[in-house]
Amino acid sequence: MGTLRMLVILAWRSLWRNKRRTLITVSSIAFGTALALFLISWADGMYRKLIDSAVRMNAGHVTVERRGYNLAPSLSLYVPSVERIRTVARDLDGVSRIKPLVTGQAMVATGSASAGVGLVGVDPAVEKEVSPIARSIKAGRYLEPGDARGVVLGLTLAKRLDVEPGMKVVVTCNDSTGELVNEMLVVTGIFGTGMEEADGFLIQVPIAAARRIFRLGPDAATQVGLVLTSPDRQGDVLERMNASLAGTGLVALPWQEVLSDLASFMSVDKGSNYVFQGIIIFLLSFTILNTILMSVLERTREFATLLAIGTAPILLRLQIVMESAMIGIIGTGLGLAIGGGISLYFEIHGLDISPLIGKNLSVTGFTVDPVLRNEVSVRLLSWLGSLVFGLTLIVGLYPAYRSARINLPDALRSR
Amino acid sequence: MKDLIRLDQVSKEYRDNGVPVLALDRVSLAIGQGEFAVVAGPSGSGKSTMLNLIGGLDLPSSGTVTVVDRDTARLSGSELSRLRLDSIGFVFQAYNLIPVLTAYENAEYVLLLRGVPRLERRERVLGLLKTVGLEGMENRFPRELSGGQQQRVAIARAIAPEPRLVLADEPTANLDSKSSADLLALMMRINMDKNTTFLFSTHDPEVIRLARRVIRLRDGRIVSDGPEA
Amino acid sequence: MITLRVAWRNLWRNRGRTGITLAAMSLSTAVMILTYALMLGMITDMEKSVVEVFTGQVQVHNPAYASEHSLYDTISRPQAILDKARSSGIAASVRAFGFGLVSSGPNSAGVQFWGVNPQAERSFGKLDEALLEGGFLPDAPGMRVVLGRKLARTLGAKVGTELVVVVQAADGSLGNDLLHVCGILKGVGENLDRSLALIHEQDFAALFVFPGRYHEIALNSHGRMTPEEVASFIKGAAGTDEVKTWRQLMPGVSDMLNSFDGFSLIFEVVFFLIAGLGVMNTLLMSTYERIPEFGLLKAIGTTPWRILREVSAEALILGIFSSSLGGVLGACAAWYLSRNPIDLSGFAEGFSTSGVMMSAQWGAQLTIAGIVWPIVFMWLVSVVAALYPAAKAARLDPVRALTHV
């Protein structure tokens, strides 16, 4: 025990004998760690926001639909009773809102032009609370539950069709039985989400109107979306929903399957982030290696003395490993504190990057809010911290190995 | 009496910038327990090489070096360090104290390595520092001590584990004549009291004059061995 | 010359330190070159995926078409434009657009028909390669159709599925016909994924009763000219028709690419910062550790100026070696990654961002500037990091310098 204590003393004091070097090393580690932490939490924050607005606009974090609908969406594959789903989902922990949707394809025409659109029947009361569309009305107003023939559409589409609120449009589509139907609707409002995909392609009508147009039952929907209180609840909710849906022909799917484009974008974006963070960490560990190795090469005389007076080589190596560990702990801790602090600040106050990227950056049809909020989690702190610390230890092994491999007679004399 | 150190036909050749240099040339020598011997000779005569070989810091090119009945060439790295720890104390020309340890800790370090219990360690280190005349300076770091004081700490460190042999490579070369004389007296006293064998290299005539046995080296060969006239 | 020789010898004397510094500098240079090339590769890939697949560098439309999207707003002199393009080897594709309703069994969807010349489309872009299933349109007409990915899903259509088409033809009649799905596209952009139906131009002419009229001519010089050069070259032949570059046509996509430029600039600055700091650390440390040595030089009468000159000479030698080493290393790595792109995900399918088709393959792009800049930057860093402590040492009085820790 005494020997170990002595090693700790030796390591600790040796560290501070050359303060400049130790401070430089520690600050390099801290800088790299803080930077990596900031970038990762930034990306996590962006993903969270992106997911949030996407699932709110679409079919929730968890989507209940007929098996097979996801791969080939057809009006014939519908959920017969929304109420049944509602009774199950309402009691689940973590479900915040239930949004029934009736989605179909249609052609919208005015006197001058026509366009293919996605027609979505929504519950206006729910949408007003969850959907970004309801919040981005640029002209007129959003749908009300009582609007029997109301329709809202996006800016781009409105421009193409040359319509304003109060004007009529004709919707043509096949209903669930395959019949061609026409329906006249009145534009109540025009929304501008900044998402090309929504603004140019989507129209929303009250769900009752959609059921009438597509000739679906009064309680039917193509999808029932569950918006959760937190994305972390997804696995739990999925499992419970699927358990209670067994045998009904319905399934609960994660948004990753429903919005597969967004999911694959994220995985690719994460992949490229990993490459960059990998490079940062590689450079970082190289700097650590340099400084520790240089310190070891400078101290050969000291090491030679320790070996000459009977220190076992393993003890000397252990001392160097301890030095790396101490540097690693201080540097990583400092880096996590600084990076965590900065990230936490931006998590609370947001970081406006609009001067950099312009107002609208959209990803697979979903807008990225230019005000980004970092997302720091204990999980992130602990894995990043252990990664950098572990790296310092690994990188310190070579200098430790080198430390005891010296020519004693020469090293004892050197200055 | 059995020999503590035996050199049989020991040669050591090393390369200096690619040029082979014969530092020791078939040297044979025996030193017994309790001797106080000096290796003398001009620089480059092989004094340091001889001490390094005896201390197991280096291995001979040919011949055998036997220290405490062990052939150094047959020992592994950790066995060599164990041998040094148990049986050999070192004193260097440039003191070579551990800069980050205090005088007390420098002397205590080897005892720690040998697993001496704490209380005994304390007692012995304090006693040793007193013996070498450094009472009250236990908590000073090497840079806060004069050269002579540093060398005294080095001697305390060397004799702390009560080794059978102390090897000193030009221990007085960096000291003034007063400090040299004191140090020499100290070593002689320890030699008397504890029967510790002292072998050191020097080219200081004062030191040579005091030694009971002088081994003179020139160009890697022993030219004379015995009490100086 | 003497200075250089002394510097050279000094570097050799402390091989450990020199090795570490050399390694740090060349590795950092290599990493900078690599990241620069990766960034550039990412941006170029994106731009390529916008331009190369079907958009082209420049498009010609009837000016009224952009606002009205009316079937009747066609290009007035398509042949003149095509002749002009052909005269300088610019690839061109002529397209006619029309809306219609397509159904398959109980499923139906509004679609945008593109009447194209399969042969011209093949030599123009990569639409014919961007297939998920089936094949591209055959050269001869035959009422075949290639569908957008999501449209196919909506219709529940597969290769071989028969589709019923209803369109409003140019003469006001209701066009009605059957089409056979011969291929399904990969993700080529959100809008097209949902609504595109590619048919042969002659089938289009028959369906819409609209022969020889076109709405769009897309042009691509395949890198020989910039979009602006192509636009100004074609303008003369276009008459009253509008000639626009892809950046003018798709300001959103252009903005997005610009914002990626912004992002990558930040990343690049961050990397240079880290690499620069790493090298600066190493150099600072190795020079600081030599302050006692400089003190000795000063004590034996070396002038401060001479010390500085010596340190600069060492930094110069190190800089030359490490930049050559790092340059070669980085260029090789970047070259390798330009040939063997990084696969970012297990998803084989491409996907789209802001209507831009992206691939999960990330290749590097190596340029001369991408090699020169990191090297110049590294030189600057090394000169500053070596000279600062040396200047400090040169000013220090010898005794203080000798005992400097």
Image (cartoon, coloured by chain):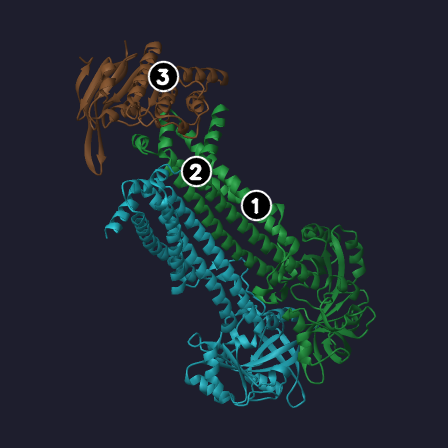
Chain colours: A green, B brown, C cyan
Q: Residues within 10 Å of mark 3 (few under 14, many from 20)?
A: many
Whether residue C108 is visible, yes or no, is no
State the residue in front, B164 or A362: B164
Asked if both marks, 2 and 1, belong to the same chain, the answer given is yes
Q: Residues within 10 Å of mark 1 (few under 14, many from 20)?
A: many
Q: Residue at coordinates 68% horizontally, 67% vertically from top-left?
A: A73
Q: Which residue is mark 1?
A: A336
Residue placed furthest toward the left: B223
Chain containing mark 3: B
Amino acid found under the numbered disc labelled 1:
Leu
The percent coordinates of residue A8 (x first, y second) are 49, 30
Residue at 29 percent of width and 47 percent of height: C303
Which chain's residue wears label 2? A
Residue B163: which disc? 3
Asked if marks 2 and 1 touch (Cβ < 8 Å), the reply is no
Out of A157 and B94, give the one closest to the viewer: B94
Q: Considering only order in the chain, which callout, 1 or 2, is on the residue closer to the N terminus?
A: 2
> B101 above or below A112?
above
Secondary structure of residue under mark 1: helix
Could you say where residue C224 lies in the image, as x and y percent from the top left? 42, 76
Residue kind at label 2, given as amino acid type: Asn
- How many dots with numbers? 3
Which residue sits at x=72%, y=57%? A227
The residue carrying mark 2 is: A18
**Quadrant of the rendering where the C terminus of chain C is positioned:** top left
Q: Secondary structure at mark 3?
A: loop
Q: Quadrant of residue B208?
A: top left
From the viewer's perspective, is the residue at label 3 or at label 2 nearer? 2
Compared across the picture, whether B102 is left or right of B69 comes to right
